[in-house]
Image (spheres, coloured by chain):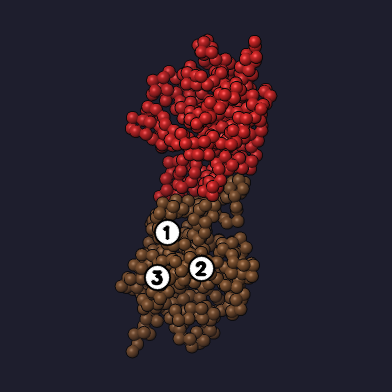
Chain colours: A brown, B red
Amino acid sequence: MIAGTVLALAGGVGGAKLADGLAALLGGRLGVIVNTGDDFEHMGLSVSPDLDTVMYTLAGIANPETGWGIAGESWAFLDQAARLGGPSWFRLGDRDLATHVLRTERLRRGERLSAITADLCRRLGIAAHVLPMSDDPVRTVVETAEGPLAFQEYFVRRRCEVPVTGFAFAGAAEARPTEEIAAALAAADLAAIVICPSNPFVSVDPILAVPGLRPALRRRGAPIVAVSPIIGGAAVKGPAAKMMRELRLDPSALTVAEHYAGFIDGMLIDEADGSLAPRLEARGLAVRIAPTLMKTQDDRRAVARQALALARAVAARRQVP
Amino acid sequence: MIAGTVLALAGGVGGAKLADGLAALLGGRLGVIVNTGDDFEHMGLSVSPDLDTVMYTLAGIANPETGWGIAGESWAFLDQAARLGGPSWFRLGDRDLATHVLRTERLRRGERLSAITADLCRRLGIAAHVLPMSDDPVRTVVETAEGPLAFQEYFVRRRCEVPVTGFAFAGAAEARPTEEIAAALAAADLAAIVICPSNPFVSVDPILAVPGLRPALRRRGAPIVAVSPIIGGAAVKGPAAKMMRELRLDPSALTVAEHYAGFIDGMLIDEADGSLAPRLEARGLAVRIAPTLMKTQDDRRAVARQALALARAVAARRQVP
């Protein structure tokens, strides 16, 4: 374990799992900065898929089969909406819809996304602090041979089938970090910053694109460690490895390390990738090798412990004269 | 039966039942002008309770127990919304919600309520024309000893318990009749106008408060007949009789006739009220006596036939030299 507070950076399913493991160890000492670049307006509702995945996962109500949405969800709304000519490509469940309707109303009334999220988390009994990366809209755009696609168009509607050529984060230049994130960063006892095993391009990069956030995290001096989302050349879930191939990058933990070069101090890699350790260490990174697949609740806590142990090791190494 | 087209004026449950009976006889030859004075914004959604009751009833999907909402409805959204701190006093079902979400989005995009309603009705397989009384917002205000109450506050939240002293229709002075209603009124073969057995104060009066609509209906020359919502001194459903008592009026078909004086040509009253016929006729009204309680689908058609027969009798009487 670790003394002090911890900040995690997370996107969707994989990130939410590690955040859940960290929350089980740290409770209210954990803050999770969550990607909002995949937020979008759907049927007039403000939908924040990554924020909701993190929230539902930390609340223990996430659907274990899909990783997104709520366990035991029903679909009466979507059935009827389709009958009335509404879109059905994005699956809005009946319970999930309560989040979107209430959030949309509160945003329209002028409340900040961070404040709404904090209130929803409180009502769901979440002790950890779920922190949207910004209260200002940032929209991830996936650049493809067919032209730019809004993230959910690419991710859900097109099922990541279109080869990517790059990414842009519309609105990022004008987005401001939030007072909640500033307060978490200012905590005197901040002990570690953990980049969850989320997609580097579309989950973590949007967070780091918020002006001032990346340097502020780096400047803070707490060890920054990443958990590789790539295991044995493949992503556990989602298109990270496929994107790397399309960008002519080798899908491996090395590419992830390269991507975060100059930002992270250490990396937790899976046992399957143990042979990569020397090359990561040659890049100046502290490395820890452990099982990183998270199938069970115990796995989540175990990987969280490993990530925190790595952060402690980085801190200890710094103290050696 | 009747040749030509028919216009009905309707509010909620009782009005919807007669509209359904008329629709069974007339199909696309029926237009139903529906009260929108009870529309309101709830959880950021535009809800039109009377419009939806008429729409669901004509589509054959209305909940037969409540008279409002959709048959076989589920409540997962409402449960979760309550858990997240949302209001639960107004019962938004999962399927019903599809109407509100889609309508709200389309209104925000600038579509007219009439056009949206026509499209929803088409998708629900409704042949009759469901015509909101206006595309402009009119809000029924119930005046009480406690001060003015928004209609749904009075009707749902306070369960009609507060004694009424009067009614106002906010926005009515600025509301315009719609092009759809103007077209229905201009039909060369308009044969009858039927005031459904809806609450005169809060279902029919808001419709007649739309500037120009009442004189246009009257000027049109088609027989105007009302079906009394009061049977044997009581309202079949809703607060009409209670309101009459609170306003120091006798709850009876006579009071209904008094209320519509100068506007209607005839009145269909229940067998229970047969003794009132001479006094109604003394007021110059054509009167028809028949069972008017609508328990079954057959009842709806039977009452519709009686209302149309009364309209035919009014027309025939006029042709007598």
On residue A7, the disc is 3
Q: Residue at x 62, y 15 (%)?
A: B318
Give the SS element for disc 2.
Answer: strand
Give the quarter of the image for residue A216: bottom left
Q: Position of residue A162 (x, y in %)?
A: 64, 68
On residue B276, the disc is none
- Which chain is mark 2 on? A
For this orientation, the residue located farthest to the left is A188
- Which residue is tagged 1? A113
Q: Name the amino acid type tagged 1.
A: Leu
Decide: is B112 above or below B249.
below
* Residue A84 seen by the camera: yes
Q: Position of residue A124 (x, y in %)?
A: 41, 56
**Left or right: B100, with A216 as reference point:** right
- Which residue is tagged 2? A169
Label 3 neighbour load within 10 Å: few <14, some 14-19, many 20+: many
Pick whichever of labels 3 and 1 is earlier in the sequence.
3
- Which chain is mark 1 on? A
Q: Marks 3 and 1: CB-CB under 8 Å?
A: no
Pick whichever of labels 1 and 2 is earlier in the sequence.
1
* Residue A74 seen by the camera: no
Q: Residue at x 41, y 34 (%)?
A: B141
